[in-house]
């Protein structure tokens, strides 16, 4: 996760994170990525059920799936996560609101001292549901919007999905529940991004996350619809430009990019030409961030209890929380791949191994490397930095 507004618009200084000792439990949510201990943020796909048919769904969700973890089992899992020091639980799916006990589970997570957030398609957020989520202390709602109405509905496989999602945004805003948008970038929709910036400005939406495509689940079929490296560079320039325009107009909207840690060095290199002093500060923040943290600072629990390095990479399970507590699985030195992921800079190959930005990128996404090359430790094919930029030419 790269905070565009934090880094490029000087909205965060290294001292902001240092003030809290960079401890996960002490840091406010907008600084959590700069933690020192890297206690894992858990993405919990609590259901495989979903009311939409999204073409890029990493979970391959469907309407009639069966939930395999009961409410009581879920509470025991949450208790273990809290005891382990997990700072945030992100309830996802499928569509998490398909579970009737979502509000109850979110409430319990908050009572245990964790921050609870949800990732949703937004179509099921009524005014009453937004009120309930606000009342139990939910920190944030991320609603997926992949373009304006026609593009979004085609992407989501259900006509009317855009209008229902935007109603969900409105309902959250009316109840004082922080809400933002999530946008997955690909060739079908990247030209919609200027309109998305207009939308968040017009609707006073305080946060937008742009997700680079990860080749997983149904998204595996979209490898050829990922942007070229040159298209990605141009898109990054556009996102930086639009973010700065918003800030210059007084709209302090939080803009982030997710799932391609080449974005960090790219911002640094641009600032090195524009503002060397700020570039130095950004480099310090990127070192705090440490790039991709799959298997260390982020983990995933699936609807069947399986534990993965992140929500996209489901080829390698480390165990099951219905059989063994997450806390025991995550710190087990005998799980070879999980152990290596916590120190993966020693194992990556190709351009990643030689890159001068390895410390701040962390080798990027292993899921994409395996999907394209069949090798967990190969270079990430989505890295768009040139050989000259990464210092190998």
Image (tube, rainbow, N blue to C red):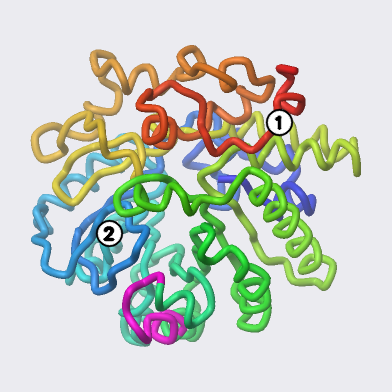
**Residue 8 picture location, percent across and down:** 77, 49
> What residue is at 43 percent from the left and 86 percent from the top?
163
**Residue 80 picture location, percent across and down:** 23, 40
The quadrant of the image that shows the C terminus is top right
Q: Earlier in the sequence, mark 2 or mark 1?
A: 2
> What residue is at 46 percent from the left and 19 percent from the top?
344
Q: Taken as a whole, is the magenta stretch helix, strand or loop?
A: helix
Does residue 15 sit above or below 180 in this rendering?
Answer: above
- Left or right? Give the position of 15 relative to 62: right
> Is residue 194 on the magenta stretch?
no
For the residues labelled 2 and 1, the Cα–Cα distance comes to 36 Å
**Residue 82 picture location, percent across and down:** 30, 43
Hey, which quadrant is residue 360 in on the image?
Answer: top right
The residue indicated by pointer 2 is: 93
Q: Nearer the viewer, residue 297 or 58?
A: 58
Q: Which mark is residue 233?
A: none
Does residue 194 sit above or below 79 in this rendering?
Answer: below
Q: Tag 2: Cα neighbours inside 10 Å, few (<14), some, or many (≥20)?
A: many
> What residue is at 27 percent from the left and 39 percent from the top?
314
Q: Is residue 125 visible?
A: yes
Q: Secondary structure at mark 1?
A: loop
- Left or right? Give the position of 347 relative to 114: right
The magenta-colored residue range is 155-166
Q: Is residue 18 visible?
A: no
- Left or right? Give the position of 169 relative to 327: right
The residue indicated by pointer 1 is: 386
> What residue is at 45 percent from the left and 18 percent from the top?
343
Q: Tag 1: Cα neighbours inside 10 Å, few (<14), some, or many (≥20)?
A: few
């Amino acid at each position: 996760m790269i905070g565009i507004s934090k880094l490029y618009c000087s909205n965060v200084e290294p001292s902001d994170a240092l003030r809290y000792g960079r401890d996960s439990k002490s840091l406010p949510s907008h600084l959590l990525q700069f933690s020192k201990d890297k206690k894992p943020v858990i993405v919990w796909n609590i259901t495989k059920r979903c009311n939409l048919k999204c073409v890029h769904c990493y979970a391959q969700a469907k309407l009639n799936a069966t939930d395999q973890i009961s409410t009581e089992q879920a509470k025991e899992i949450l208790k273990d996560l809290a005891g382990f020091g997990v700072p945030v639980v992100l309830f996802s799916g499928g569509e998490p609101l398909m579970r009737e006990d979502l509000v109850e589970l979110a409430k319990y997570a908050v009572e245990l001292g964790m921050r609870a957030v949800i990732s949703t398609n937004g179509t099921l957020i009524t005014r009453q549901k937004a009120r309930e989520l606000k009342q139990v202390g939910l920190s944030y709602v991320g609603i997926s919007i992949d373009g304006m109405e026609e593009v979004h509905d085609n992407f989501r496989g259900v006509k009317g999905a855009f209008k229902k999602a935007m109603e969900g945004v409105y309902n959250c805003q009316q109840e004082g529940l922080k809400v933002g948008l999530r946008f997955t970038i690909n060739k079908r929709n990247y030209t919609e991004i200027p309109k998305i910036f207009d939308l968040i400005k017009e609707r006073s939406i305080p946060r937008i996350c742009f997700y680079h495509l990860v080749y997983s689940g149904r998204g595996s079929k979209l490898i050829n619809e990922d942007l070229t490296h040159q298209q990605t560079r141009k898109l990054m320039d556009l996102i930086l430009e639009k973010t700065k325009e918003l800030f210059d107009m007084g709209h302090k909207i939080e803009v982030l990019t997710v799932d391609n840690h080449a974005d960090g060095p790219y911002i640094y290199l641009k600032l090195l030409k524009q503002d060397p002093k700020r570039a130095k500060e950004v480099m310090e923040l990127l070192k705090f961030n440490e790039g991709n943290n799959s298997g260390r600072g982020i983990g995933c629990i699936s609807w069947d209890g399986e534990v993965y390095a992140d929500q996209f990479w489901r080829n390698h399970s480390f165990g099951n929380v219905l059989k063994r507590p997450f806390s025991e699985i995550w710190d087990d030195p005998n799980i070879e791949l999980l152990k290596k992921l916590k120190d993966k800079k020693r194992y990556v190959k190709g351009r990643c191994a030689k890159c001068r930005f390895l410390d701040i990128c962390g080798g990027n996404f292993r899921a994409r490397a395996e999907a394209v090359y069949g090798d967990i430790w190969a270079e990430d094919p989505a890295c768009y930095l040139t050989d000259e930029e990464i210092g190998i030419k």
